[in-house]
Image: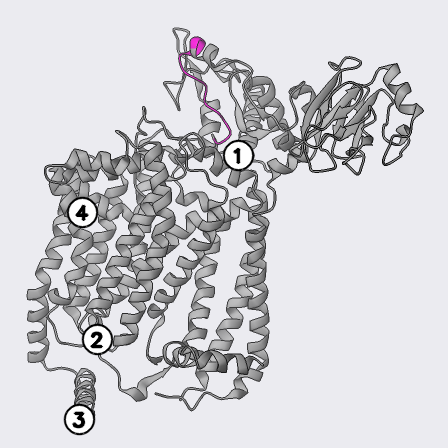
């Protein structure tokens, strides 16, 4: 037991040590409600899908998520409902334009240290230097332009709007990275409740049986 | 009717007597603490891993072009596929968690001592099989961490004298970890659990020959044994309930905490992630590997660090019963070792720096030194305890064991 | 070994019985995800319905689409074909053409011969199955054996003038 606790404790220490040595990420409270995720879908469709794909998400997944099926029909055009959400720009063109293929975003919310916070901080991490070029705090080597326009946003209202849009997008990405997360957690509460009751009963049975031993 | 069926079987196969002798009526020391629950838990996790693994294999595809996608297919499309996958991936950690406690208990209470050497060694074999199975299973999702973990570990075999490079290529079936490697790892990952089941049976046969150890550290007299059923069946089930609660917290609420983020990126042989780490259960051994500046030396040190446990029955020369319980020096050594394991685990996790390498080297040195000091320390401790005078409690234990041995001898 | 504490009274104990029932229910519930995982996954179920755009099928032309892994023939019938089909009631299994179509110009049938499951070929008016020589007319009705039944009409509905969804009526 001690051995494991030590390893566990050391992992926690290591994680905190690592985090402190890197750029500090903003924390985002991810929305799980259909409206937030739905807004994220729309933002992704208009701002991201020209370059990025979501190959593990199908149009039918959007319908079952509760997105208006008329909008889904509009986005998919003549593709079947079972088609995956692919980038509009062929990968070769993207390579030519940016020098690297834009990554698939289906698992992005899970594929970086920091998860949702990383993506959120990255989207908002753009800034303009005095010489007029745009850079990113979180991922300096990024090839992606500042899509949400954070580097040019001066007014507080504008920045807040961009932040809330980033939150919508991140919420959608979190859903996409693990579509069954809600189902998993709600099932988890039942399982924990059941196990608690069963274990309690086993505890009483155990006491009863052992009490007979002199 | 059931009675007649059992009668029919008993005339042809020793069913009832087997169940009576080895299961329900198996004489078990009544003073076992909850630390003795973990053998049963290990068996349970093994069955859980086999069951979830077989059902996952119905959907998994061992092909570099398909495996990553097939995992996502399981996670998204297969009915309850996410549950099966998280049960399995969390189950791997649970298995090591349980096994490490099982081993720590054996070390603490000196359960490896005569006549339980073979029991301990079959357990060592099980640990090696488990490590192999876990390592091969980790390649199957074909993520970045899978790929680079397998690359690093197969490269360890370059330390083989004379034919190192050939051995590595033979293991992989390719110049790098590739399609051939993935397919054979899948085949073996499916096979190994059945070898483990076989080894578990050997482990249990050995256990039932020498009987369970117990916290007193001596063999109890027969009057202190109680039948396994119902006393330990219910105790094991109660322990299982507690274990399942902890396990379910991970499965349902934080399953990704045990999966490295980089493993959600498909394997890319052209780019190594900045920070590659093995799963938490390999970290101390990985730290030992990194601490030795020489490649061959590191591999040997890592191998020895796992295998050295097998020498415990000979390294520990004390005759004082009760494991660490009645032995203050050995107890100190045990906790010091546990802390050292923790330090090694931490060093294995963080990216190497000059400072961390130095700490790792010191911890590695301590790791082996503790084992090498044990023969002298245990003998010294025994003499010291004898000289100081044993407590009546220990004297009574030794006396009762002596009595039991002489009784057995006279019976013969 | 201490054994006297064991007696059969234990078995009738209510708490033990209740715990066994609760535990057994848990084991049974645990089996559900394992069994369910062997049922068709959601991507397979998505194939339960197939959407077909009819725009590009010219009169007299036929289009074959896969629906639940089976071929479905979509025939854009010309006025002559409609006339021929409505005038007769078929052969071995008489049925009015109007029962077999939702719009007279569109015939939708499963392209699996009702005899031994081969896929018939479009030949002349109707289809001919090359396995055993069965013949069907332009309404998919069997007019020569050995096939016993007309080609099956799958459930489908028009979601637009030129779009149908096969799989649900």
Q: Earlier in the sequence, mark 2 or mark 4?
A: 4
| Image position, residue A38 (x, y; %) | 64, 30
What whole-number distance in Å separates the C-alpha atoms at marks 2 and 1?
53 Å
Q: In what quadrant of the picture does the N terminus of chain B appear?
A: bottom right
Q: Please report the residue visible at 78 percent of the width from the left and 34 percent of the height from the top.
A: C145
Q: Which residue is mark 4?
A: B302
Q: Nearer the viewer, mark 3 or mark 4?
A: 3
| Image position, residue C155 (x, y; %) | 78, 34
Relative to A78, residue C99 above or below: below
Relative to B144, residue B404 above or below: below
What whole-number distance in Å separates the C-alpha atoms at marks 1 and 4?
39 Å
- Residue B319 falls in which quadrant of the image? bottom left
**C56 or B345, nearer to the observer:** C56
Q: Which residue is mark 1?
A: A174
> Along the horizontal axis of the image, is B392 left or right of A44?
left
What whole-number distance in Å separates the C-alpha atoms at marks 2 and 4?
30 Å
Q: Nearer the viewer, mark 1 or mark 4?
A: 4
Q: Please report the residue visible at 78 percent of the width from the left and 33 percent of the height from the top.
A: C151
Q: Chain of mark 4?
A: B
Q: Which residue is mark 2?
A: B322
- Residue B50 falls in which quadrant of the image? bottom left
Q: Chain of mark 1?
A: A
Magenta range: A96-107
Residue B410: assigned label = 3
């Amino acid at each position: 037991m001690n051995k494991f606790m030590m390893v566990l404790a050391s992992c926690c220490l290591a994680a905190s040590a690592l985090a402190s040595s890197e750029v500090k990420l903003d924390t985002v409270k991810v929305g799980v409600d259909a409206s937030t995720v739905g807004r994220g879908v729309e933002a992704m469709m208009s701002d991201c899908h020209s370059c990025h794909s979501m190959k593990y998400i199908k149009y039918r997944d959007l319908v079952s998520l509760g997105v208006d099926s008329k909008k889904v029909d509009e986005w998919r055009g003549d593709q079947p409902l079972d088609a995956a959400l692919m980038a509009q720009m062929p990968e070769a063109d993207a390579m030519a334009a940016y020098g690297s293929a834009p990554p698939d975003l289906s698992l992005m919310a899970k594929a970086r240290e920091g998860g949702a916070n990383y993506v959120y901080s990255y989207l908002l991490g753009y800034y303009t230097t005095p010489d007029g070029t745009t850079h990113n705090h979180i991922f300096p080597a990024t090839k992606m332009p500042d899509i949400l326009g954070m580097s040019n946003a001066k007014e507080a209202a504008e920045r807040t709007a961009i932040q809330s849009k980033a939150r919508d997008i991140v919420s959608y990405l979190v859903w996409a990275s693990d579509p069954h997360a809600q189902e998993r957690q709600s099932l988890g509460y039942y399982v924990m409740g059941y196990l608690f009751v069963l274990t309690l009963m086993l505890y009483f049975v155990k006491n009863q049986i052992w009490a007979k031993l002199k | 009717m059931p009675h007649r069926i059992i009668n029919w079987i008993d005339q042809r196969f020793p069913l009832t007597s087997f169940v009576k002798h080895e299961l329900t009526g198996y004489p078990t020391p009544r003073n076992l603490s909850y630390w003795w629950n973990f053998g049963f838990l290990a068996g349970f996790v093994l069955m859980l891993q086999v069951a979830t693994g077989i059902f996952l294999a119905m959907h998994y595809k061992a092909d570099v072009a398909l495996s990553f996608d097939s995992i996502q297919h399981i996670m998204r499309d297969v009915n309850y596929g996410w549950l099966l996958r998280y049960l399995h991936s969390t189950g791997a950690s649970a298995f090591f968690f349980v096994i490490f406690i099982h081993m720590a208990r054996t070390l603490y209470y000196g359960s490896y001592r005569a006549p339980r050497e073979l029991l301990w060694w079959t357990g060592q074999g099980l640990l090696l099989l488990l490590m192999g199975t876990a390592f091969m299973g980790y390649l199957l999702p074909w993520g970045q961490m899978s790929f680079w973990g397998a690359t690093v570990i197969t490269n360890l075999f370059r330390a083989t004298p004379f034919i190192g490079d050939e051995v590595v290529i033979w293991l992989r079936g390719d110049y790098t970890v590739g399609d051939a490697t993935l397919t054979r790892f899948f085949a073996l990952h499916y096979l190994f659990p059945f070898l483990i089941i076989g080894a578990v049976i050997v482990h249990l046969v050995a256990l039932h020959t020498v009987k369970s150890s117990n916290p007193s550290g001596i063999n109890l007299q027969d009057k202190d044994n109680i039948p396994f059923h119902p006393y330990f069946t219910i105790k094991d089930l109660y322990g299982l309930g507690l274990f399942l609660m902890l396990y379910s917290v991970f499965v349902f609420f934080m399953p990704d905490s045990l999966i490295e983020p980089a493993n959600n990126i498909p394997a890319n042989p052209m780019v190594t992630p900045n920070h590659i780490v093995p799963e938490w259960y390999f970290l101390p051994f990985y730290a030992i590997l990194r601490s030795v500046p020489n490649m061959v030396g590191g591999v040997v040190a890592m191998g020895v660090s796992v295998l050295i446990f097998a020498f415990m029955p000979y390294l520990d020369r004390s005759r004082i019963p009760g494991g660490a319980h009645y032995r203050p020096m050995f107890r100190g050594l045990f906790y010091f070792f546990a802390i050292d394991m923790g330090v090694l685990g931490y060093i294995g996790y963080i990216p190497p720096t000059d400072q961390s390498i130095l700490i790792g080297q010191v911890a590695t040195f301590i790791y082996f030194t503790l084992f090498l000091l044990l023969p002298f320390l245990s003998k010294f401790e025994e003499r010291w305890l004898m000289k100081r005078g044993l407590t009546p409690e220990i004297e009574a234990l030794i006396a009762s064991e002596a009595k039991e041995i002489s009784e057995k001898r006279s019976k013969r | 070994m201490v054994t006297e504490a064991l007696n059969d009274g234990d078995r009738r104990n209510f708490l033990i019985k209740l715990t066994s029932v609760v535990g057994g229910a848990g084991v049974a519930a645990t089996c559900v995800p394992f069994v369910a995982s062997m049922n068709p996954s959601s991507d397979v179920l998505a194939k339960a319905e197939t959407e077909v755009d009819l725009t590009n099928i010219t009169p007299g032309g036929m289009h074959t689409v896969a629906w639940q892994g089976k071929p479905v023939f979509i025939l854009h019938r010309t006025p002559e074909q409609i006339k021929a089909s409505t005038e007769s009631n078929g052969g071995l299994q008489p049925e009015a053409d109007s029962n077999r179509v939702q719009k007279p110009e569109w015939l939708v049938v499963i392209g699996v011969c009702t005899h031994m499951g081969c896929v018939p070929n479009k030949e002349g008016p109707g289809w001919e199955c090359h396995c055993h020589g069965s013949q069907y007319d332009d309404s998919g009705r069997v007019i020569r054996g050995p096939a016993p039944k007309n080609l099956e009409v799958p459930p489908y509905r028009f979601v637009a003038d030129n779009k149908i969804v096969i799989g649900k009526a």
